[in-house]
Amino acid sequence: MSTPLGITRVAFDHHRNGVSGEPFWSARFEATWDVGQSEPFVAILIEPQDDEQFDLGRCYVLAVRDLLDGGPTRCWRGDHFELELRPLLAAAKHRLARDSALWGQFPIIVGMEAES
């Protein structure tokens, strides 16, 4: 599998995951490949815990096309996407910090510089 050249059209949503579950962020995004084609994906981003030795958390990525086809999904390397998704997630969190009225108004959309 190749590494995407860029990620665009990102929308984040936060899920509390109940009272005792591990909260996570979901992301819908488009990944652009070297041949100029793009493909929609979804990702689950889990924040790093205080006791983890790495700055990044966990990132699970699935291709939307595989999910819609109903067959087995291909595995995508989260590390190919996480380094680009985390700064975009930080931008979404920054928007939430500036305007607390946005909480509950998901999805928070960032990275919309892609064509309309």
Image (tube, rainbow, N blue to C red):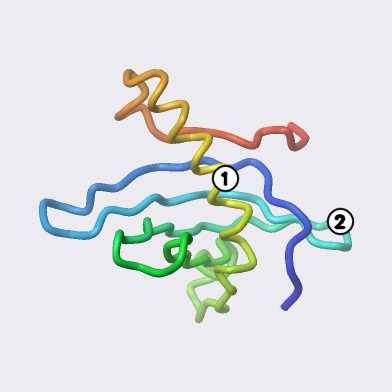
**Which circle's residue, 1 or 2, is located before the other in the chain?**
2
Residue hosting label 1: 87
Q: Is mark 1 on a helix, strand or loop?
A: helix
Q: What residue is rendered at 55% in x and 78% in y?
A: 75
Counting from the top left corner in percent of width and height, residue 23 is at: 27, 53
Q: Where 77 sits versus 19, above or below? A: below
Q: Residue furthest right?
A: 35
Q: Where 109 sits versus 35, above or below? A: above
Q: What residue is rendered at 48% in x and 35% in y?
A: 92
Residue 53 lies in quadrant: bottom left
Counting from the top left corner in percent of width and height, residue 84 is at: 63, 53
Q: Is residue 20 left or right of residue 22?
A: left
Q: Which amino acid does label 2 sit on?
A: Gly
Q: What residue is rendered at 46% in x and 42% in y?
A: 12
| Nearest-to-viewer mark from 1 and 2 | 1
Residue 36 is tagged as 2
Q: What residue is rendered at 59% in x and 64% in y?
A: 65
Q: Quadrant of the C terminus?
A: top right
Q: Where 82 sits versus 28, above or below? A: below
